[in-house]
Image (cartoon, grey):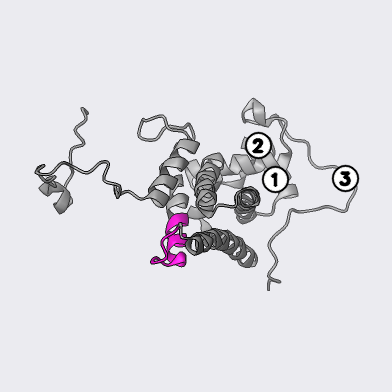
Amino acid sequence: MTDGKAPEHKTRTSERHPPRARAPRSDASEQDLSVPERLLRAAARLFASNGFDATTLQEVAAAAGLTKGAFYYYYDSKDQLLYEMHRRVISYQLNSAGKILSEEEDPGEALRKLVIDFVGSIARFRDEATIVVRESHRFPPEAMPRVQEDRQRLHDLFKRVIEAGQQRGVVRRSLSAELLTLALLGMCTSTYNWYSRFGAVAGDGADAEEIGAGMAAMCLDGMLDVDGAGVAPRGAAPVAVPAQAVSGAEVSTGREP
């Protein structure tokens, strides 16, 4: 039986000290982190690269400089690690979004900043975001109500801004606010699939802020050149779509292999 509460960090009432950590097998920048933080980072890297099922607690503990026995002082299971990753990502997103909305009154600009910031959060927590999305069915049953509540809060936040934009005439009223919210969040969330933490996308060297700005422009300004600035001159030949593209066959990009 569960009481509907999300799992919490394990706490001890005894007076014994936590186990001493071995020298961590991680970057020097992580050596000053707390042990729970090192465990989370190590787990995120291993889960993202090797898979949730394929990664053992022994491997997570070793990557953080601990023994497997010491791991259980801080966490109960891989499922709890997964929930903590969700909490880290969603807390950052909600807090950052709240700050944006407290400073920006224009709904159009608020939406633009929200998209840029959301994409930035995926880049910042790429491993965690990847695992949370990919393994969302593995959350402990007692954690699911809280996970769903957190996600709904973020959804509602975006939707309220979109509705405010519709009321002010800066967002098209002909489109459902719910549909726009789902599409916008879905597109932003999917960036974990292709964004490189090193800031390279398809070799163009764009960073997270540039990518977020581009996605915001595409969503909010549209892909079509409605102003006519990029319209082909009259009499221009129509663009031919390769037959291979229609049939699903491989289409050359025009680049040298």
Does residue 170 sit above or below 21 in this rendering? below
The crowding category of the residue bearing disc 3, from other C-alpha atoms within 10 Å (few below 14, some 14 to 19, many at least 20), is few
Could you tell me which secondary element the residue under label 3 belongs to?
A: loop
Residue 55 position within the rendered picture, expressed as x and y whole percent measured from the top left: 54, 46
Q: Mark 3: which amino acid?
A: Arg
Tell me, yes or no, if residue 53 can be seen here.
no
Check the image and name the residue furthest to the right: 15
Q: Mark 2: which amino acid?
A: Ala
Mark 2, residue position: 64
Residue 231 position within the rendered picture, expressed as x and y whole percent measured from the top left: 22, 44
Q: Are marks 3 and 2 in contact (CB under 8 Å)?
A: no
Q: Name the residue nearer the viewer: 156 or 73.
A: 156
Mark 3, residue position: 16
Residue sitting at 47 percent across and 62 percent down? 166
Mark 1, residue position: 71
Residue 25 position within the rendered picture, expressed as x and y whole percent measured from the top left: 63, 30
Q: Earlier in the sequence, mark 3 or mark 2?
A: 3
Q: For residue 67: magenta?
A: no
Tell me, yes or no, if residue 241 can be seen here.
yes
Q: Mark 1: which amino acid?
A: Phe
Q: Earlier in the sequence, mark 3 or mark 1?
A: 3
Q: How many marks?
A: 3
